[in-house]
């Protein structure tokens, strides 16, 4: 088991690689990628039963990045965990490259579900959780959805069915950074109160600081004790976390940094732990 400081260092490196890969690609989504780095690192380095040498082993835990545009965070985490060489990150979105703009389960080691059409990932996670139960597997399913994404009606159909089928092998993180491509959630389509909504749909709800490794750990430990309900972890995060000029700025939802902005961001992240 890694120390908190070791996980924080991993998350810092993930954030640095997000900046590097988007700067090289000239396109992509930094804001919502930077906001989920701490969650992903805790999942992939501590919580999930996985083996990068056997990415398709049947008894592995599954992960679904429903907000598929934040693929840079997933790719950087997978490279950090050893699923493929870190050099692949700098080929992001290049023609013929392994890593494209959204996760591809057919070609990328470690990707369990192709995502990108917002609202669909939680339904896929439900199906995985149901299938694992039918197989009498102890494996668990983890998903991350965006707070703007939960404006999609399919999310709530999935939330309702997950509770109906008592999928206690399913954990869904809600990346609650408060912003989406067109502005704040409250301005575009108010999703609050997020936790109360999931509770009303029959989920066990935990609210945390999504950049606090210890809080993430504790929430995941609690989720393992919950029986008869899926668990929703509402993670309060900062869009663009770790880069001063990107933090809490909706304009950095889907805009890549230029060379000077990359330099500044990487300088800041050298001192960033969370």
Image (tube, rainbow, N blue to C red):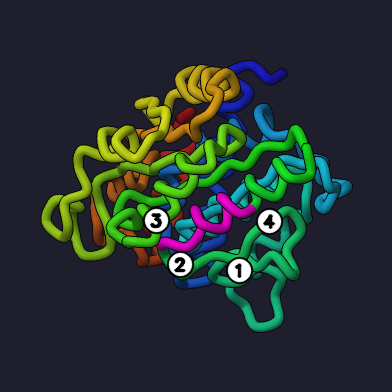
Inter-mark Cα distance, 3 to 2: 29 Å
- Is residue 105 left or right of 102 when viewed as pictured? right
Which mark is in front, 4 or 2? 4
* Secondary structure type for disc 1: loop
Q: Earlier in the sequence, mark 4 or mark 2?
A: 2
Residue wearing tag 4: 112
* Residue 225 drawn at (x, y percent): 57, 18
* Secondary structure type for disc 3: helix
Main secondary structure found in the magenta portion: helix
- Is residue 251 left or right of 142 when viewed as pictured? left
Q: Is residue 186 above or below residue 142?
A: below
Q: Earlier in the sequence, mark 1 or mark 2?
A: 2
Residue wearing tag 1: 92
Q: Which residues are magenta?
A: 119-127
Mark 4 residue crowding within 10 angstroms, few (<14) / some (14–19) / many (20+): many
Which mark is in front, 1 or 4? 4
Which mark is in front, 3 or 2? 3
Q: Is residue 126 magenta?
A: yes
Q: Earlier in the sequence, mark 4 or mark 3?
A: 4
Q: Mark 2 and mark 1 in contact (Cβ < 8 Å)?
A: yes
* Residue 245 drawn at (x, y percent): 28, 49
Residue wearing tag 2: 28
- Is residue 109 left or right of 211 when viewed as pictured? right
Question: Which quadrant of the figure contains the N terminus?
Answer: top right
Residue 157: image tag = 3
The answer to whether residue 259 is seen in the rendering is no
* Residue 238 drawn at (x, y percent): 32, 40
Q: Nearer the viewer, residue 125 or 15?
A: 125
Q: Earlier in the sequence, mark 3 or mark 2?
A: 2
Mark 3 residue crowding within 10 angstroms, few (<14) / some (14–19) / many (20+): some
């Amino acid at each position: 088991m890694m120390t908190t400081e070791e996980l924080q260092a991993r998350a810092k490196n993930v954030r640095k690689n997000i900046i590097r890969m988007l700067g090289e690609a000239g396109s992509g989504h930094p804001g919502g990628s930077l906001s989920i780095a701490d969650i992903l690192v805790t999942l992939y380095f501590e919580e999930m039963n996985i083996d990068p040498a056997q990415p398709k082993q049947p008894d592995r835990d599954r992960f679904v990045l429903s907000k598929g545009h934040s693929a840079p965070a997933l790719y950087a985490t997978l490279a950090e965990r050893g699923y493929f060489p870190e050099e692949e990150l700098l080929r992001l979105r290049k023609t013929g490259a392994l890593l494209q703009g959204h996760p591809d389960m057919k070609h990328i080691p470690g990707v369990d579900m192709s995502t990108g059409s917002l609202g669909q990932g939680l339904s896929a996670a439900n199906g995985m959780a149901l299938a694992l139960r039918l197989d009498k597997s102890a494996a668990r399913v983890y998903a991350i959805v965006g707070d703007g994404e939960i404006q999609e009606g399919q999310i709530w159909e999935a939330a309702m069915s997950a509770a109906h089928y008592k999928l206690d092998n399913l954990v869904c993180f809600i990346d609650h950074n408060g912003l989406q491509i067109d502005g704040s959630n409250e301005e575009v389509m108010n999703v609050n109160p997020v936790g109360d909504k999931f509770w009303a749909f029959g989920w066990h709800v935990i609210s945390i600081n999504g950049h606090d490794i210890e809080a993430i750990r504790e929430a995941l430990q609690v989720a393992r004790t919950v029986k008869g309900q899926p668990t929703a972890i509402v993670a309060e995060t900062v869009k663009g976390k770790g880069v001063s000029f990107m933090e809490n700025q909706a304009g950095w939802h889907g805009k890549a940094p230029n060379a000077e902005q990359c330099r500044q961001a990487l300088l800041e992240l050298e001192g960033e732990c969370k």
